[in-house]
Amino acid sequence: MKAIVIIGDGMGDRPLAALNGKTPLEAARKPSLNMLAEKGVCGIIDVIAPGVPPGSDVAHLALLGYDAEKVYSGRGAFEAIGFGVEVLPNDVAFRCNFATVDSKLKVIDRRAGRIANVDAARLAEEFKEVTLQGHEDVQILFKNTIQHRAILLLRGAHLSTMVSDSDPHIVGKKVLEVRPLNSTAEAEKTAQLLNELTHHFHKVLKNHPVNIERESAGLLPANIVLCRGAGKLPDLKQFPLQYGINAVAISAMPLVKGVCKAAGMKLINVSEATGTYDTNVLAKAHAAVKALRSYDFVFVHVKATDLAGHDGRVDEKVRMIEKLDQLVGYIIRNVDLGTTCIAVTADHTTSSRTREHEGDPVPVVIYGPEVRTDDVKEFTERACARGGLGRIRGKDFMPIIMNLLGKTKKFGA
Ligand SMILES: [Zn+2]
C-alpha cells in the first residue's frame, strides 16, 4: 500500500457573508473531493491544538507526525534549506528582506519596491564573504532568493537564536535595534553582531551603483537588509526512516520544502507549480502520479488557497479549491485505487474575512481500500465534523496513514 497526501494551504475557512453563509469549500464545485469523502473516512483536525492558529511551518511539522511544540526552533532554517542553502546544525538562520529606508533609518518600503532578482543578486554579491571586526570567529553567509527575499546564516561558536528582529514589520517605523532575548553571553554576542551587520549593510548599500541606477530610473533603492525569525535546524527524527518508507514532497513554497527536507523527505521540483494563482496543478498531479511509481509516500502541497485567504479574495479562494479538486481528480483517475491511500487536508484555517490564520479545525478525508467509511458525502468543514475520524490532533494524522500502509509498530506485547 502507498499513500498520496494533498495539503491545501489555509484551505479551511469560516462561513462568509459574501458566500451567503457558506465557506469557500462549501461554495466550490468539487466532485473529486466529494467522491473521496463519500468513499473514505472524514474528520476534523486541530493541527496544533483547539483554538491555536498555526504557522505553516509548525502545521506541516505536526501533519508529518512531529510534536511541533517540542521540536520547533524557528522559521529561518527551514526556509534556508528549502532554498537549497546548506544549513549546519549550529548555524543561526534568519529570513531577510532588502528594504528601503530614509536617512534616519525609517522604513519606507519593506520590499525595496519588490526589487527584481537580477538587482538583488548584484547587491547580494557584496555580502558573499563578510567578516566583521571583532567577530572574526563568525562566518557570515548571505544569499538572495526571490525578489526582495534573502537568507542570512551565522556560523560559528557561541551564537544564539534568542535575539529579536531588526525588521520593524511596519512601514514608517525605524529599523529596530536587535536585542538579546535572554541573558546569555551567546544572545548578547549575536545581537551585537546583528546590529553591526545592519549598519554594514546600510553603509555598503546606500551608495551602491545598483541603487544609484535604480534611483535614476525612479525605483526605490534597496539600501538596507532587515532580519527576522532567527532559527536553527531542529534535530528531527527522520520520518521516512521511522516508518521504513521512501517519501517525497512536491511544493513550490521554500518553507514547506524546508520542513519536508528537514524531515528526511526527497523533493521534486515542478517548474509550472508557482505557488501563486497561475500555478499549474495538473503538472503537480502528473508529477505526483509519476513519483508514486518509485516512492511509497508522496506529499503534495498547494499554496494558492492560502494566498487567496490572505488577500481576502473569496472568489479566488473558491476557484483555487476547484483547481485543487482537478488535481485530486487527476490522481484518482491515474493511480491504482486498490493499493493507494489518498488523503486531503489543510495545514490551517485562513479566514478570508480576517485575512489571518485562525485556530479553527480543518477538514480531513482519508480514502483507502480498507478504511472504515462513514456517512459523510461532502468534503467541507461542517460535513467532515460528522465523520468517522472524529476530531484529532495534527500529530495523530501521520500514524493513522502509516497504520493503513501497514507501517506502524505494535505498542505492548
Ligand atoms: Zn499554511
Image (cartoon, helix red, strand yellow):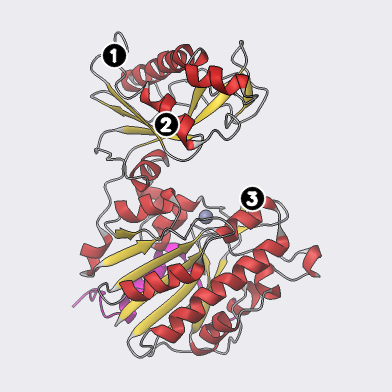
Q: Nearer the viewer, residue 275 or 169?
A: 275
Residue located beneath label 1 in the image:
135
Asked whether, in this view, residue 76 is left or right of residue 45, the answer is left
Observer able to see residue 389: no
Q: Over which residues does the magenta segment extend?
A: 385-413
Q: Of tags 1 and 2, which is closer to the observer?
A: 2
Image side of residue 207 versus residue 137, left or right: right
Tag nearer the camera, 3 or 2? 2
Marking on residue 36 = none
Residue at x 26%, y 74% (from the top left corner): 408
- Residue at image mark 3: 356
Tell me what residue is drawn at x 52 percent, y 35 percent. 116
Which residue is the extreme one toward the left? Answer: 413
**How far separated are the C-alphas under marks 1 and 3?**
39 Å
Count residues near mark 3 (Cα–Cα under 10 Å), then give few for <14, some for 14-19, many for 20+: some
Query: Which residue position is annotated with label 2?
Result: 121
Query: Mark 2 vs ligand 1: CB under 8 Å?
Result: no
Q: Residue at x 68, y 68 (%)?
A: 24
Q: Secondary structure at mark 3?
A: loop
The alpha-carbon separation of the residues under discs 3 and 2 comes to 32 Å
